[in-house]
Image (cartoon, rainbow, N blue to C red):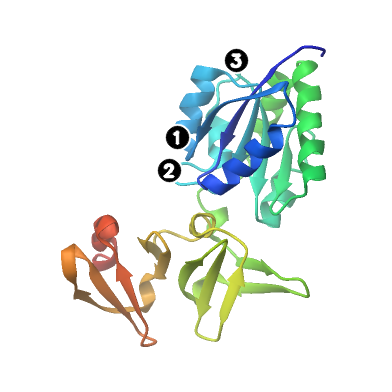
Amino acid sequence: MDNREFNILIVDDEELARDSIKILLESRPECQVIGECENGQDALLKIKSEKPDIVFMDIQMPKMQGLEVIQLVDESVAPIFIMVTAYDEYALKAFDLNAIDYLLKPYSNERFFKSLEKAISRVASRKSTKELTILKQVLKGFNLDTNQYKGRLVIKSASKIQLVNKNEIIYVKASGNYSEIHTLAKKHLMYASISEIEGQLDPTLFVRIHRSAIVNKENIKELESHFNGEYIIHLDNGEQLKLSRSYRNRLESIIGH
C-alpha cells in the first residue's frame, strides 16, 4: 500500500458538502480528488471515464439517486462507495452491509477517516468488484422509485426527535444550512438542504417553485401573474410564495395536478 495513490470522486449536489470532503482529504496526500459531480447522471459518466478508486456519494440528488447510480455502474469499473446521507432510514436499511460504508450527516472527522481507511483497505485488497456485485444483488430488493417517498421526515434536535408526516407538509423553505418544514400545526427546523428534502418528497404531490422553496400542490389556492414571468402562489392557509422565472417550467405540473 506504500506510495499508492487513491483516486477519489466526490458526488453531492451541495457545494458546501463537496468542499467539506475536499478539506478533510487535504491531510491525506495519497488521496487525489479527480473530480466532482452535482448529480447522479454526471457521476455515472465520470465513474465510467475516470475509473475512481473511491466515490463519496450523496444519496438524495437530482436527476438520479445515489443508489440508482450504484445499480448502473459497470462492474468492470467497480469503485468502493462511501454513501453520504442525512437520513437514518437509508443507513439502517442499506448500509449495514459489509459491502458498503456510509457517513451520516453531520459526521465527525473521526468517523470520516474511519470510513476512508476502510475504503482504502478494500481498494488495496482488490475486493471492490466482488463487493459491487454483492451490493447490486441486495439493492435489487429495494423499490427505489417509491420507498423514498413513503413515511415521515425525521427531524432531530439536541433534546428530541420529531416525526412529521410528509402529507402534512404545506411547504418547505431554505434557511441557511437548515430547512423550514411548514405544516398547518407548526414550523419545524431541519438540518438538511432543501435539495435533500426534495429527494424525499413525492414529485406528484410536491413541486420546487424556487431555489429556496418547495410547495405541496394540494395547498395551492391560486396563482397570480407577477413581473418577468414570475407568479405569486397563494396557499389555502393565507400565505404567499413566489414561483421564480427559472422554475416557470413547473407551472404545467401545478396546473395539470
Q: Quadrant of the N terminus?
A: top right
Question: Which of these two is toward me, 157 or 3?
Answer: 3
- Residue 72 on image: x %, y %: 53, 29
Dot 3: element: loop
Q: Which mark is residue 76?
A: 3
Dot 2: element: loop
Q: Quadrant of the C terminus?
A: bottom left
Q: Which mark is residue 63?
A: 2
**Is 175 situated left or right of 99 in this image?**
left
- Labels in figure, total: 3
Question: What is the crowding at mark 3: few (fewer than 14 residues within 10 Å), some, or many (at least 20)?
Answer: few
Amino acid tagged 1: Gln
Q: Is residue 140 visible?
A: no
Chain-order first, disc 2 or disc 1:
1
- Residue 54 on image: x %, y %: 66, 27
**Is 159 situated left or right of 226 in this image?**
right
Question: What is the crowding at mark 2: few (fewer than 14 residues within 10 Å), some, or many (at least 20)?
Answer: few
Query: Circles 2 and 1: CB distance less than 8 Å?
Result: yes
Dot 1: element: helix
Q: In this figure, which residue is indicated by the disc labeled 1?
A: 41
Amino acid tagged 3: Ser
- Residue 109 on image: x %, y %: 78, 44
Chain-order first, disc 1 or disc 3:
1
User: Would you identify the image quadrant in which residue 223 lies?
Assistant: bottom left
Q: Which mark is residue 138?
A: none
- Residue 174 on image: x %, y %: 48, 65
